[in-house]
Image (spheres, rainbow, N blue to C red):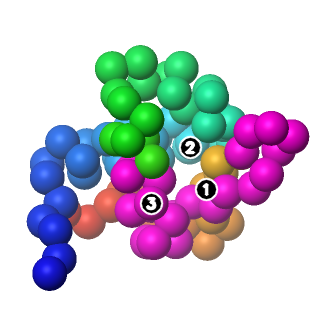
Amino acid sequence: MHRQIAPEDTELDRQVLELLRRRRRVTLLGLADSFPGCSWRQLFAALNRLLNARLVVLAPLGKDYEVALCPSSSNRESLRG
């Protein structure tokens, strides 16, 4: 059974992608700081959707992780609704 993506989820995904387009790379802690109104659960769900869509990559960075746009996704305009 597939879960429908709620509009607020799609909006968070778009906001994360926009942040990455501006900053290129951000740590998980930096991502949380950028979205103080979101829970870790919401952020991890957004990252999971973006990872599954191959729009972002995660890389270990010390005790944190770095999130970046996939090189092939940097030319895509936005998520499709």
Q: Nearer the viewer, mark 2 or mark 1?
A: 1
Quarter the C terminus occupies: bottom left
Asked if residue 80 lies left or right of residue 28, the reply is: left
Q: In this view, does 17 lie to the left or right of 59?
A: left
* Mark 3 surroundings within 10 Å by alpha-carbon count, few (fewer than 14), some (14 through 19), many (20 or more): some
To which quarter of the image does residue 70 belong? bottom right
Q: Mark 2 points at which residue?
A: 21
Count residues near mark 1 (Cα–Cα under 10 Å), then give few for <14, some for 14-19, many for 20+.
many
What amino acid is labelled 3 in the image? Asn
Q: Which mark is on residue 48?
A: 3
The kind of residue on which mark 1 rests is Leu
Picture coordinates of residue 54, whole percent (x, y): 52, 71
Front residue of 30/24: it is 30
Q: Is mark 3 on a helix, strand or loop?
A: helix
Q: Are marks 3 and 1 in contact (CB under 8 Å)?
A: no
Front residue of 4 and 63: 63
Residue at image position (68%, 36%) is: 27
Residue 1: which numbered mark, if any? Answer: none
Local crowd size for mark 2, using a 10 Å CA cut-off: few (<14), some (14–19), many (≥20): few
- Residue at 33% x, 61% y is 79
